[in-house]
Image: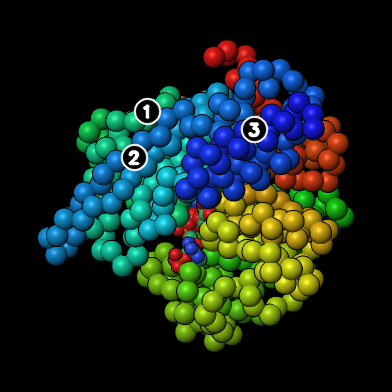
Amino acid sequence: MTQATDYIASIQATVEGRDPNQPEFQEAVGNFLHTITPVFEAHPEYIKANILGRLTEPERAVQFQVAWQDDQGHMQVNRGFRVQFNSAIGPYKGGLRFHPSVTLSIVKFLGFEQIFKNSLTGLPIGGGKGGADFDPKGKSDAEIMRFCQSFMIELQRHIGLDLDVPAGDIGVGGREIGYLYGMYKRLRGAERGILTGKGLSYGGSLVRPEATGYGLIYYTEAMLKENGQTLAGKTVVVSGAGNVATYAIQKAQEYGAKVITASDSNGYVVDETGIDVATLREIKEVKRGRMRDYAAAVPTATYYEGSVWDADLKYDVALPCATQNEIDAAQAKRLAAAGVIAVAEGANMPSTPEAIAEYAAAGLFYGPAKAANAGGVAVSALEMSQDSRRMSDSFAVVDGQLKAIMENLFAESVAAAKEYGVAGDYMAGANIAGFTKVASAMLAQGW
Ligand code: NDP
């Protein structure tokens, strides 16, 4: 045992001992810690400054009541959260998730990942995340609005242009951001930069809806190119049918790949002729329907119940774009056996630690979420910049910046992995590149 491995083990033990009931947060910290030892071997000053002790405890975590009235006139109560994890390189930045599974553990895992993701983009933003255990499914627009208004009445106390700028995530899209912003404006005035993911007519950025999905494909293409491959001609399996999945499918098809699946939490569709993005958007975004409705509308598609990662399919590239821990070890083995050469994560932490070990054992190219899905927050930061300048950049300008950011962060991950003796490990590279910027900023600012 070296001083570095001792130190990292002690951090892991502290996190496990302090929050034994936060499995997702422990998983995210564990995934990170086991790749970071070489940095601590090279920088003992980070041990003295206890950088990891400070990084694994949020700077601030707020939990609050969200009471709202349903369409029948009954008062409902949900639990809201905002975790402000680390502000060393800029104001806290990260999405809001509305889903019944949201707990402090989920918000902390997402906020922890966000620190390094935001650092990797090269933009001046710290890490945070928030949300509520509210289920938007089956709610009327009026119920969604009343929930968002009540959520913002409390959240507005904790956010600010140079303090904390939330965005969307699962269950929080353009509609929810609109209602949240409308209530913020009534309470505090028209500060456009207070939320990102806004509509274009009130301060949003072109390319923000597409950014995470497009960015995932720019990253995937860079990873394949590094290994003498390209997306053109590849068969791709995508999970999810939300914001990230939809635009990943669209961009992958533009790059000449054939995407044969999309899914929701009930089941998935397979269409060997390629998913029709226009129909998918109509069903998900306009009708707020389910994947079984897609299969009913598209004659070449077949609907199956269950997880797409259990499907018996032949394909080359896997893009999980739904949720955390959607691929376990057995499913990772199955996809490697199906001929997959690359996995790139659109969702946050979609692969369990055991699944990641299977990718490594099978020699797959693996693009971890904090790098591969950083496009969303990158364009959010560009939206903040446009709001400050009171200017709107064109689609081509923002898309060009997004592509450059994704290619650059992939290149930085490759370089960091090489520098610290783990060449070809894109997960370690992303963790190291994201971490070293934050650690040096923390050291420079004292404590
Ligand atoms: P959406 O709410 O738009 O879509 C989520 C999709 O994933 C839906 O198809 C949903 O199906 C499915 N899903 C959600 N929970 C589960 C579950 N427990 N099991 C199976 N499927 C599930 O969310 P986004 O597309 O925005 O987010 C998807 C992932 O990408 C998340 O991990 C998010 O954190 C991550 N991400 C999002 C960013 C963004 O800019 N939006 C940025 C970076 C990462 P159903 O309708 O049945 O719930």
* Total tally of numbered discs in the picture: 3
User: Disc 1 residue type?
Assistant: Gly
Residue 112, image x, y percentages: 55, 39
Q: Quadrant of the N terminus?
A: top right
Q: Mark 1 near mark 2, Cβ–Cβ under 8 Å? A: no
Q: Is residue 265 left or right of residue 398?
A: left
Q: Is residue 226 above or below residue 278?
A: above
Say which element carries label 3: helix
Q: Is residue 387 above or below residue 447?
A: below
Residue position marked by numbered label 3 in the rendering:
10
Ranked by sequence position, the earlier of labels 1 and 3 is 3
Q: Is residue 377 above or below residue 172?
A: above
Q: Residue at x 62, y 14 (%)?
A: 444
User: Disc 3 residue type?
Assistant: Ser
Disc 1 to disc 3, C-alpha distance: 35 Å
Q: Nearer the observer, disc 1 or disc 3?
A: 3
Give the residue furthest to the left.
73
Residue position marked by numbered label 1 in the rendering:
160
Ranked by sequence position, the earlier of labels 2 and 3 is 3
Q: Nearer the viewer, residue 153 or 295?
A: 153
Q: Is residue 381 left or right of residue 346?
A: left
Q: Residue at x 47, y 80 (%)?
A: 292
Q: Which mark is residue 63?
A: 2
Residue 210, image x, y percentages: 54, 52
